[in-house]
Image: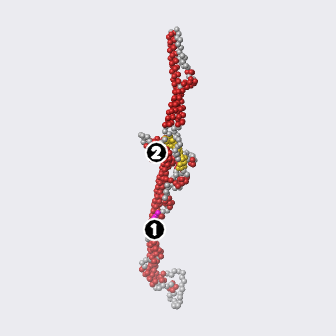
Amino acid sequence: MSSSFRAPPAPSPEDMNLVILCRAIWQQKKLILAMTMLLSIISFAYAMLATPEYQVTSVLRAAAINELDELNRSEIYKLPPAEALTKVGAALESYDVRLGFFRENQRLFKAFEQPGRTLEQSFEAFNRDSIKLTMPDKKSDSRNFYIKLEMNYPEGVDGVTILNRLVEYTISSEQKQIAADLKVIVRNRLSELKGKLDAARANYDTEKEAKIAMLSEMDSLKRMQLEDELKALRAQLKNTRLDRVAQLNEAIEIARSLGIKRPATPSSFGGGDQVGSANVMRTEINNQQVPLYFMGVDALEAERVALMRRRSDDFVESRIAQIAKELQLLQANRQIEVLKLRQNEDLFLSGVEPIRAESARLRNLNLDMSHLKLVAIDRQALDPLKPIKPKKSLIVVLGIMLGLLLGVLVAVFRHMFFFTSRITRNDELRLSAEKSARVVSGKAAPLVSPKY
């Protein structure tokens, strides 16, 4: 007995071709359309309800050379325009400068404050996500240096005011920093010049004391030399006088022995026996020195008495009077007195004129840093015409595309799921039919699962 029941043949994997898949997707077009509409509505709602985000930009360029000419001509602080722009850019990027601006203008940052956050945490969120700085390339031409500062902010925040005030605050802080640096440099330079003046004064005092000591020493030496010379001259004159007395004593004895009482000559002494006329005048020419005893006893004794009575021989030598004059002059050195009586000794310092001129120039240096133009603001931040986020049309288009893609994927997965379920049911029906046929025919055969 045979059964008339036949299980429907199971579809093979080759049946799942592109045509069937497209047909299955088309059959689920309502699902795809529903998913597309749902994602489109969600994306449209997001585009309409999302907080708009705006962007403002400010551009800074190097200042003109004449703007920094007064500072550079001061010869104590050199700041080329490119370096000034770099300093401002570094300050704009500085965490401390931005935090200082944030603290001074907290009312402008109310939108960034959140409950449970400290002031620094709120600033960190703003500093990390809102500001972008583009610094110049150092290898590029200095004339093309620029700094670009961009700020993104949500609706309800006055981003234009924040960016413009941040630039002004940074420039002002750099001006104050340069003014403080300039003040310190001037103070240090004045201190250095004062040190040089003090050194010049100390050197002058040393030189003056050395000069006074040298003059005093020269006077002392001169005085001692004159006193020694005076003493030697007096001793010489005394010895000369004693020698003269000794010579006179000897001549007196000779004159007495020869009977010469009054001055005579050798010729008159030789012709004493001849009778001469009283009217005869004798003239004697002799190239030899006449001996002293011919002066006669009376003259020699008179000279000896005068020499013995002499108390001082100073009048004999004119040099003694000259020495006395010089010793009198050495009692007071007028040059030393003038040196000691100087009132304003700074007038006599040598080589300090440039130092005094530089010191006077630095003290009269008056640089107004508040008007110093470090950079040129090429473009200030202006109110944007439209937000940069969200891009509504793009979001809606992406939503439609994402909904369509998601609907197609869901349709494909559903088709695959139902197709696999149908194959499984067909396999079960076929196995059941074969089992029934074997029972009826009485044949025992192993059950083999079909392979697809």
Q: Position of residue 372 (x, y in %)?
A: 51, 53
Q: Residue at x 55, y 20 (%)?
A: 12
Left/right placement of residue 145 relative to residue 123 reads: right
Q: Residue at x 52, y 27 (%)?
A: 31
Q: Considering depth in this image, is 332 or 404 the residue closer to the camera?
A: 404
- Tag 2 secondary structure: helix
Q: Position of residue 48 (x, y in %)?
A: 50, 37
Q: Position of residue 226 (x, y in %)?
A: 46, 71
Kind of residue indicated by mark 2:
Leu
341 inside magenta stretch:
yes
Q: Measured along the vertical axis of the image, is residue 363 above or below residue 288?
A: above
**Label 1: few (<14), some or many (≥20) within 10 Å?**
few
By secondary structure, the bulk of the magenta-drawn segment is best described as helix
Residue at mark 2 to residue at mark 1: CA–CA distance: 75 Å
182 inside magenta stretch:
no
Q: Which residue matches tag 1?
A: 338
Q: Which residue matches tag 2?
A: 108
Q: Earlier in the sequence, mark 2 or mark 1?
A: 2
Q: Considering depth in this image, is 302 or 189 the residue closer to the camera?
A: 189
Q: Considering depth in this image, is 298 or 185 the residue closer to the camera?
A: 185
Where on the picture, by quarter, is residue 309?
A: bottom left
Residue range of the region highlighted in magenta in the rendering: 334-346
Kind of residue indicated by mark 1:
Val
Q: Position of residue 122 (x, y in %)?
A: 45, 42
Q: Is residue 96 visible?
A: no
